[in-house]
Image (cartoon, rainbow, N blue to C red):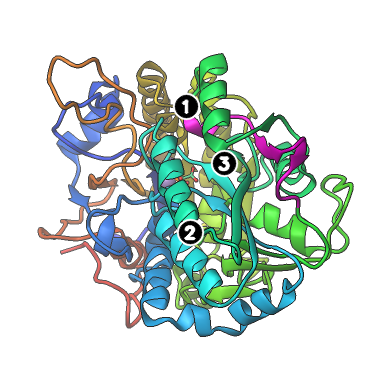
Amino acid sequence: MNKKPVVLVVMDGIGCTEKDNGNAVMHAYKPQLDTLIKTCPNIQIKAHGLAVGLPSDDDMGNSEVGHNALGCGQVYSQGAKLVNESIETGAIFKSETWKEALDSCKSGTLHFLGLLSDGNVHSNIAHLEAMLKQAKADGVKKVRIHALLDGRDVPETSALQYVDQIENLIHELNDENFDIKVASGGGRMKITMDRYEANWKMVEEGWHIHVLGEGRKFASMKEAIETYRKELGVSDQDLPGFVIEENGKPVGTIEDGDSVILYNFRGDRAIEISKAFGNENFTEFDRVRFPKVFYAGMLQYDGDLKIPNKFLVAPPHITNTMSEFLVKQGVKSYAISETQKFGHVTYFWNGNRSEKFDDKLETWVEVPSDVIPFEQRPWMKAAEITDLLVDAITSKEYDFLRVNYPNGDMVGHTGNYEATLIGVESVDLMLKRIMNACDKAGYTLLVTADHGNADEMYEKRKNPEDAPKPKTAHTLNPVPFIVYNSDVQLKEGHFGLSNVAATVVELLGFKAPEGWDESLIK
Ligand SMILES: O=C(O)[C@@H](CO)OP(=O)(O)O
Ligand SMILES: [Mn+2]
Ligand SMILES: [Mn+2]
């Protein structure tokens, strides 16, 4: 085998299936991908469920677990699973953090903030339910819930199902000693859950809604959702923020002496709001009022920056990553994406660490993303990313280069089939440029994805004659793994994303370290 530098392309959200259920991957005009699959060694690898450390094979893949597995060559039990286990054993409720959270709000309110669904990508409503029951059992007097609506990891207009579920539990738990209410909420793509500092305005709006109780007022969550749906016709993820009021007053602003638990377990979209609650000297926006609260996350979202410093369940301690390994070998690497996925190829890739292992050997490049609905620009920043990546390949400075193209995923999440076709086609167009650059430089090119999304743009239909309903979530499908410009043969069998790291280092001429899943090369 000829040892050469390697370029790895992650086509975010581009999975493989023969099924045509609004399959924007199948139907996109993508001559490069088609040729690569026809002429190069390639297999399909698993990107969901147990293969990436999720609780079961009913769990679709996602970027966090996908990039963790790609970047560390191992499968770790992930947040979704760790929290389940901690609740099952009761460890979470014996933790210091839980006790402190309860002690700290003895004469105040215990607030739960998080994504209200069972998507299991960022959160699970079952975790919230378990904590509400335990809070009552532990003698908490007053609880307020700040509910972010999903429609991105679950069907796009399914919010009322989860609202009913939580309202039923509230009804069951409420009595003269336990006062529990929903206080505020809004769509996850409108407030609070921004990531990678793409749009701090979202977090500022969330702060006004949850903390200050400033925003459009409604009598109930249901009324807010139904009113906004009628007025705007948008999916759950895009519903504006709302504040629940009674007698002209918000029912649950966040005040000095309260405790706040962010029950999302995934980090990327939890870090900014955690900074707003946790940093004394915070400058991203004017908080107007900064209540002195005890703040904890379900997990610690960033191990380097210790965000937040209090958490209920320890995150997977991901060690022995590919970046660590390459740095030890003195290999120079290059990582690039646009803002929306920049942390995926850096922070997730390195096991949820925001710092480099070595400043000199690692180069990270972020192309600023547009702040617009991505169906309006499905090509996103693919061309700008490729300009820089091609320069980096041509410079011959780096032995390992990785890139994430968000299009299949970010446009896929809009549920817009036509735009997603263009998203996939934009990525395909870029592949040609990268192939050319690799030809000239004599580099090996690997093409894969972190999970599916664009491959199923319609929900499953009950009756074949029903009109297609847009699907915004990820899929359970495998992803391609293609080797271009190398004479290797690939193994046959059942493999997953965690087999890629060993494959990369082998192509670079190293023996993969102990403990990594095997390489895909025969
Ligand atoms: O947008 C996100 O936060 C998730 C879906 O919840 O997508 P990805 O895992 O691809 O980042
Ligand atoms: Mn992804
Ligand atoms: Mn996604």
Image position of 66 with respect to 361: above or below = above
Crowding near the residue tagged with mark 2, few <14, some 14–19, many ≥20 C-alpha atoms within 10 Å: some
Q: Position of residue 183 (x, y in %)?
A: 65, 46
Separation of marks 3 and 1 at Cα, in angstroms: 20 Å
Number of marks in picture: 3
Mark 1 crowdedness (10 Å alpha carbons): few <14, some 14-19, many ≥20: many
Residue type (three-letter) at the residue carrying disc 1: Ser
Q: CA distance from mark 1 to mark 2?
A: 43 Å
Q: Quadrant of the C terminus?
A: bottom left
- Look at the image and tell me in which quarter the N terminus lies: bottom left
Q: Quadrant of residue 81?
A: bottom left
Q: Which mark is residue 399?
A: 2
Give the labeled residue for mark 1.
235
Identified at 22% across, 30% down, the residue is 34
Callout in the foreground (1, 2): 1
> Which quadrant of the structure image shows residue 465?
top left
Q: Position of residue 54 (x, y in %)?
A: 32, 63
**Residue 395 seen in render:** no
Q: Residue at x 27, y 24 (%)?
A: 31
Q: Which residue is mark 3?
A: 340
Please state which amino acid type lies under the numbered disc 2.
Asp
Q: Quadrant of residue 193?
A: top right
**Residue type indicated by callout 3:** Gln
Q: Is mark 3 within 8 Å of ligand 1?
A: yes
Q: Secondary structure at mark 3?
A: helix
Q: Position of residue 45 (x, y in %)?
A: 22, 53
Q: How dense is the environment of label 3, judged by Cα within 10 Å: few (below 14), some, or many (20 and up)?
A: many
Image-based side of 300 in relation to 293, left or right: left
| Label 1 or label 2, whichever comes before in sequence order | 1
Query: Is 23 within the magenta?
Result: no
Give yes or no for residue 246 being in the magenta stretch: yes
Find the magenta span and give its range.
Answer: 236-253
